[in-house]
Image (cartoon, rainbow, N blue to C red):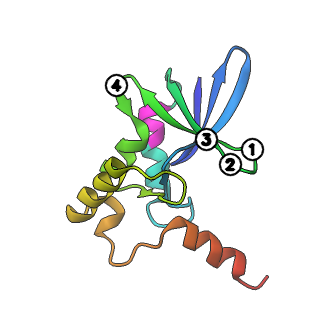
Amino acid sequence: MTDVTDGDSITVGSEGREIRLELAGIDCPELDQPWGDMARQFTAYLAKDKRVIIWPAYEDPDGRLFAFVFVEDINLNKALLRAGLAWHYRKYVHDALLTALEMEARAAQKGLWGDLNPIPPWEFRNQRSDSPK
């Protein structure tokens, strides 16, 4: 059982327990950003209620698991980049193929790359947390 929280966060059920994980090497727009809901829908279309294979990449200091996720022969992380629904998050994963997939989507103006000035989700989160309450 796989449930989708947003474009780059899923919960996988296995052996009676649930594992929440983030997709490694990418960062999708937040749900309240342009393209955020589309990224979630894309991930749900490919992974929701399907059997997935998880390839753990790392755990962050907060204990969150980051992994590459495969649905049949599709690497979900790469599919989101190809579709123009994610940034390669170079801060944690340095991978030339992920960079190339993002650059190809940018050049083709796929997904969020068709917008004039898409705001990376890490900047969007910082702007939100810096705003007065």
Considering the whole magenta stretch, tell me its main secondary structure.
Answer: helix
Q: Which residue is mark 4?
A: 73
* Residue at screen point 76% across, 85% down: 132
State how far apart marks 2 and 4 are (Cα).
Answer: 27 Å
Q: Are there few (<14), some (14-19), or many (20+) residues within 10 Å of tag 3? A: some
Q: Amino acid at mark 1?
A: Gly
Q: Which residue is mark 2?
A: 60
Residue at the far left in the pictured view? 108
Question: Quick one: 120 or 68, which is closer to the camera?
Answer: 68
Q: Secondary structure at mark 1?
A: loop
Which sits earlier in the primary sequence, circle 3 or circle 4?
3
State how far apart marks 1 and 3 are (Cα).
Answer: 9 Å
Question: Quick one: 66 or 13, which is closer to the camera?
Answer: 66
Q: Which residue is mark 1?
A: 63
- The part of the chain drawn in magenta is 43-47
Split into 4 quadrants, where in the image is the C terminus?
A: bottom right
* Residue at screen point 32% across, 66% down: 113
State how far apart marks 4 and 1 are (Cα).
Answer: 28 Å
Q: Which mark is residue 99?
A: none
Snapshot quadrant of residue 13: top right
Residue 71 in the image, given as x and y percentages of width and height = 42, 27
Do residues under tags 3 and 2 come within 8 Å of each other at their CB atoms?
Answer: yes
* Residue at screen point 44% across, 29% down: 70
Q: Are there few (<14), some (14-19), or many (20+) residues within 10 Å of tag 1? A: few
Do residues under tags 1 and 2 come within 8 Å of each other at their CB atoms?
Answer: yes
State how far apart marks 3 and 2 are (Cα).
Answer: 7 Å
